[in-house]
Amino acid sequence: MSHGIDWKSATAPSLADFEVMAAAAWERIAPEFREVCGDVVVRVEDFALEEVLDELDIESPFDLMGLYQGLSLDKKSVLDAPREPDMVFLYRRAILDYWMETGDESLGEIITHVLVHEIGHHFGFSDDDMEEIEEQAAD
């Protein structure tokens, strides 16, 4: 059952492919949720930097699928000096590994889940709130 896929030349989705999927997930998320995020930037990397893993006490880069880096809106002030924008990192290789292990969710669903949860946990959303946001954004 090859389903028309040429497995000899098939490749995993690239960083650029992930960026397209992350942008599509972002657009499906309810506008109210996106507004809370301000000008957050979504970046896709293969793995988290070693320093990040060390800081979070994570041994394997496959154990971190995403990370929110920045200050939540309630901690920002108009008097703050300009700084880099807040970012959500999505880690392609860890997400692909999880996708292959579970096999019961689409890659788009997993990317949406990681994106919503990284932002949601940072801003103090409940798991129920995040589940509702994900359901509304289902691909």
Image (cartoon, grey):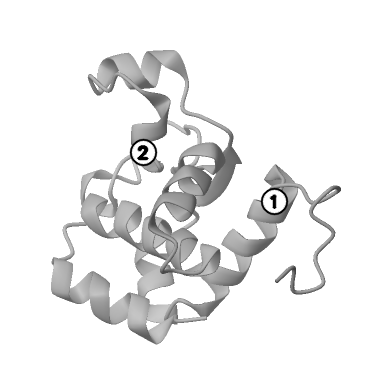
Residue shown at 27% from the left, 60% from the top: 120
For residue 51, what is the image quadrant? top left
| Outermost residue to the front | 1
Say which amino acid is labelled 1: Pro
- Percent x, y of residue 34: 43, 70
Judged left or right of residue 82, residue 131 is left
- Percent x, y of residue 23: 62, 64
Say which amino acid is labelled 2: Gly
For residue 15, what is the image quadrant? top right
Residue shown at 58% from the left, 43% from the top: 44
Query: Which image quarter is the N terminus in?
Result: bottom right
SS at badge 1: loop
Residue placed under numbered mark 2 in the picture: 70
* Near-viewer residue (76 or 32): 32
- Percent x, y of residue 66: 40, 43
Q: Earlier in the sequence, mark 1 or mark 2?
A: 1
Q: Residues within 10 Å of mark 2 (few under 14, many from 20)?
A: some
Q: Is residue 59 visible?
A: yes
Judged left or right of residue 41, residue 5 is right
Residue placed under numbered mark 1 in the picture: 13
Q: CA distance from mark 1 to mark 2?
A: 27 Å
Q: Residues within 10 Å of mark 1 (few under 14, many from 20)?
A: some
